Amino acid sequence: MAQAKTAGKKKQKNSFILTLGLILLIGYFVIIIIGHIIEIRESNAELEQQKQILEQQLAENEQLKEIVESDDKSGYIEQVAREQLGFGLPNEKVFYDVTPGA
């Protein structure tokens, strides 16, 4: 009778240890899967951002290609001079908006 009680306690102890081990193993895998899901979402967001940048660059390239292929480049030269270099035509008054937030 004493051996039956010890065997029953031993089975309960082994069963508890096995159950605890399985719960920890499952928890570990759940944490790993959640980490991978988060990485996938971040990668997808970065991919979308890169796609938008690509579309903008392709549109800009198309505009530049049209300018290069056209015979009238003076309009483009004037635009670059005004926007990037800050130049203006002679006797032209240029006003700059210096209000905050503009």
Image (cartoon, helix red, strand yellow):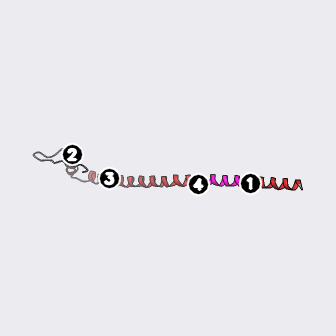
Across and down, in percent, residue 24 comes to: 66, 52
Label 1 sits on a secondary structure element that is: helix
Give the residue at x 18% y 47%: 96
Q: Are marks 1 and 4 in contact (CB under 8 Å)?
A: no
Q: Which residue is mark 4?
A: 33
Q: Which residue is mark 1?
A: 16
Quarter of image, res 52: bottom left
Mark 1 or mark 4, which is nearer to you?
1
Label 1 to label 3: alpha-carbon separation: 66 Å
Q: Between disc 4 and disc 3, whose residue precedes?
A: 4
Across and down, in percent, residue 51 comes to: 41, 55
Q: Between disc 1 and disc 4, whose residue precedes?
A: 1
Residue type indicated by callout 3: Glu
Q: Which residue is mark 3?
A: 60
Label 4 sits on a secondary structure element that is: helix
Mark 1 or mark 2, which is nearer to you?
1
Q: Which residues are magenta?
A: 14-31
Label 4 to label 2: alpha-carbon separation: 54 Å
Label 2 sits on a secondary structure element that is: helix
